[in-house]
Image (cartoon, grey):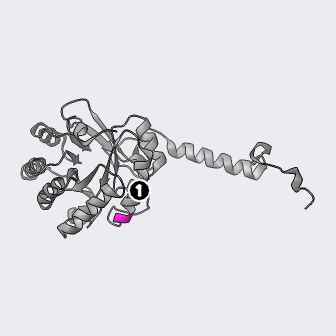
Amino acid sequence: MTTITEFRDRSGGDPITMLTAYDAPTARVVDEAGVDSVLVGDSMGNAVMGYDSTLPVTMEDVLSRTGAVVRGVDDALVVADMPFLSYGADEADAIENAGRLISEAGAQGVKLESGPHTVDLTERLVDLGIPVMAHLGFTPQHVNQFGGYGRRGTTRDAARELLDLATAHEEAGAFSLVVEHVPANVAAQITEALSIPTIGIGAGGETDGQVLVITDVFGLSDRSPSFAEQFGDVAGEMTRAVSAYRDAVESGSFPAAEHSHVDEELDDL
């Protein structure tokens, strides 16, 4: 299995691949395809739980789904998202929540949507043996504060703040950094400044790796962001399979003899 040290040492090397997953069968597919890391993202709120945002996702949701993903993975590094308000209000609660994702669910690291308020927390978690992946740029848990899903770091001051925060989180011990929905040249400069790997999403091609939400990749999303790409038509294949099942039941061709067992001793009850 990929270790945190091996992942951290990928900075400047071959491109890193990362995808989200929220259940064991999907995680198994991602792992067997050779993807380097699986993120159990709070994007589960939008992607698979039917919410309009990530905000309703709870610790219990993430714990349950992280455990499922861990059970489906042999080689990929598994990182779990810290959901909304599971950290930031009280340090002791944040440490307990992060620790549960490691000790109970089996994640190898946690991801924090980061800002000035998470620098000290990152250092504290790392000191306690909890690896931290930072996340800067667009952070979906702040959607109400941002007023939407627009690009971040689009002014010189905002871009400089992102660069300074990225450096601060590296110095605090973060093993990697997700950079989301920022100008590609800003992400490139952040990547150049850091010795830990950057994972981009909507941040151009000069980061050390890329991450996407699995339902966007599969073509299962109702709406995908402009920076995502559909790499398959899983929705179409699912529709074909379900329709074929319905037709077989309605026509009487399923179940067939090979799907059933007859015990002749039980005739004439």
Q: Residue 125's x, y, as percent?
A: 18, 57
Q: Is residue 40 left or right of residue 233?
A: left
Residue 57 visible, this angle:
no
Residue depicted at x 19% and y 66%: 88
Q: Quadrant of the C terminus?
A: bottom right
Q: Nearer the viewer, residue 255 or 122?
A: 122
Kind of residue at disc 1: Arg
Q: Nearer the viewer, residue 157 or 169?
A: 169
Q: Quadrant of the N terminus?
A: top left
Total marks drawn? 1
* Residue furthest right as drawn: 268
Q: Is residue 217 left or right of residue 240?
A: left
Height in image: 208 above or below 181?
above
Q: Residue 73's x, y, as percent?
A: 41, 43
Q: Tell me where the magenta segment starts and ends, as one range.
A: 56-60
Magenta stretch mostly in which secondary structure?
loop
Q: Residue 112's x, y, as percent?
A: 23, 56
Helix, strand or loop at disc 1? helix
> Counting other residues with Cα less than 10 Å from the Cα at mark 1, is it few (<14), some (14-19), or many (20 or more)?
many
Q: Residue 58's x, y, as percent?
A: 35, 66
Which residue, given by chain and number where applicable, does mark 1 sit on? 65
In magenta segment, residue 57:
yes
In magenta segment, residue 45:
no
Residue depicted at x 44% and y 62%: 50
Picture quarter containing residue 102? bottom left
Q: Nearer the viewer, residue 190 or 98?
A: 98
Height in image: 41 above or below 240?
below
Residue 86 visible, this angle:
yes
Height in image: 5 above or below 60?
above
